[in-house]
Amino acid sequence: MRERRLNTNSYPGLKRLSIFEGLSTEEVDRIAGVLHERKFSPGEMMMKEGDLPSSCMVIVSGVVGVYKKFAGGEEEHLVDLHRGDMVGHFGLIDGQRRSATCCAKATEVCALELSRDDFETLFQAETPFAYKLVERIAMDLVERLRQITRKLRDLSNDPTLRQRRKTLQNMSELVGGMDVSALEEDDYDLDNIEFVGTGPHRIIRKD
Amino acid sequence: MTHPLASFFSKIPIFSDLSDEELNDLLRGVTPMNLKAGEILFREGGTADAFFVVQEGNLQIYARSNKGKQVLVSTLGPGEVLGEMAVLDPAPRSATVRSQTASTLLRMDRSEFDYLRTNFRPAAYKVIRSICHTLCERLRTTNAEIARLAEGQEAPTAAAEATEKAGPSGARQEKKTRPLRETLSRLFSLGSD
């Protein structure tokens, strides 16, 4: 892995990245001072499942493979990420351990790294970039939770998975912020609940 | 001067990171509203144009079952926040909310919140960050559950155990687990960070 400090003159493509959209050149310049450009050789690990998050990265070029270990011990390939995608950004928010491993695939990957400490400093300093980043994280979270809810619902309606239907539905409601485990089977298909809220919802059993 | 509702708001988790000044900023956009017992606050399918904090009274959340029946799924009381996802997600309301008792709510219009947001006010972004924190937790919990399912070890929730009838033989179970596992690990990729 090679690393060098970044500046906008040496990096004219910086402003074209979606995370910098709408920011003034001065703002981009200011942020560039805390970002690190990092290059990973093909196959090189960028972050490791289980590690504590110290930073997030935005992909500038190359393809990043995301992998997760399941109980059998084998690592499974989950998804590929590309230019403009972010990795590790949820860790900026909650500080939890990495949920997957990211590696550069067949080509070199170039990424910009922001440390958690720098993010915190920028956020406390009320920097528009930090706010835009939070907004981006929020949108990614909403989109992912929405996709998962949809898929879980499809799965729960899959006749070959009938036995697990209740569990899958439970999970999809959990994603939507609603624990409906106390409901009776008849009243179960609450297909339309999504993102009712983020608070702990008390559940009332139907009478 | 500190807003009279500042101390009430500061005890609510999604506002607890806000300074007095930031709370004042946020509270300028908040208007109180009263509901009579039985009155509908919003209906499923309606535009999500505001979020609410319950100051007094109780509110009931109803969702529609597959048979079209309205089912009471939750009750919210003082200090609880309702509809805050409207801030992040312009999707229509997914449930109907009705006041159980005479209630006082504090309403923040999405447009008021967006004003704070477009002006890069810390109040808005601290709230969004706090909502993100909850969503992160939710995503990680879900991912953990999916991973458990993918491994064929279902989460031992009471509900799941109660509804699962006498299980099939081990061989059949194994046969069933395999495609489920594949489907779920694909699903997992949507949620991985």
Image: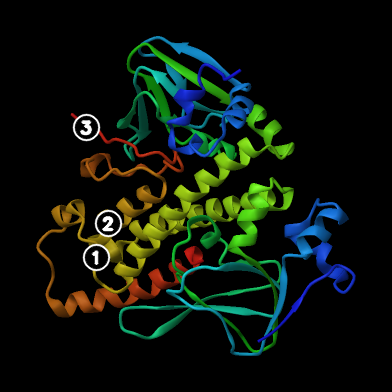
Residue under label 3 = A206
Seen at 14% across and 77% down, the residue is: B170
- At numbered mark 1, what does the secondary structure look like: helix, strand or loop? loop
Rendered location of residue B150, percent (x, y): 33, 71
Residue under label 1 = B154
Kindly indicate whether the residue at mark 1 contacts the one at mark 2 (C-beta within 8 angstroms): yes
Q: Is residue A30 left or right of residue B98?
A: right
**Tag 3: residue type?**
Lys
Q: CA distance from mark 3 to mark 1?
A: 26 Å
Foreground disc of the pair 3, 1 = 1
Q: Which mark is on residue A167?
A: 2
Q: Which mark is on residue B83?
A: none
- At numbered mark 3, what does the secondary structure look like: helix, strand or loop? loop
Q: Is residue B156 left or right of residue B19?
A: left
Graded by Cα atoms within 10 Å as few (under 14), some (14 to 19) or many (20 or more), the crowding at tag 2 reads many
> Are dots 3 and 2 on a single chain?
yes
Rendered location of residue B40, percent (x, y): 43, 18
Graded by Cα atoms within 10 Å as few (under 14), some (14 to 19) or many (20 or more), the crowding at tag 1 reads some
> Are dots 2 and 1 on a single chain?
no
For residue B64, what is the image quadrant?
Answer: top left
Graded by Cα atoms within 10 Å as few (under 14), some (14 to 19) or many (20 or more), the crowding at tag 3 reads few
Seen at 79% across and 55% down, the residue is: A21
Kindly indicate whether the residue at mark 1 contacts the one at mark 3 (C-beta within 8 angstroms): no
Of B50 and B172, which appears nearest the observer?
A: B50
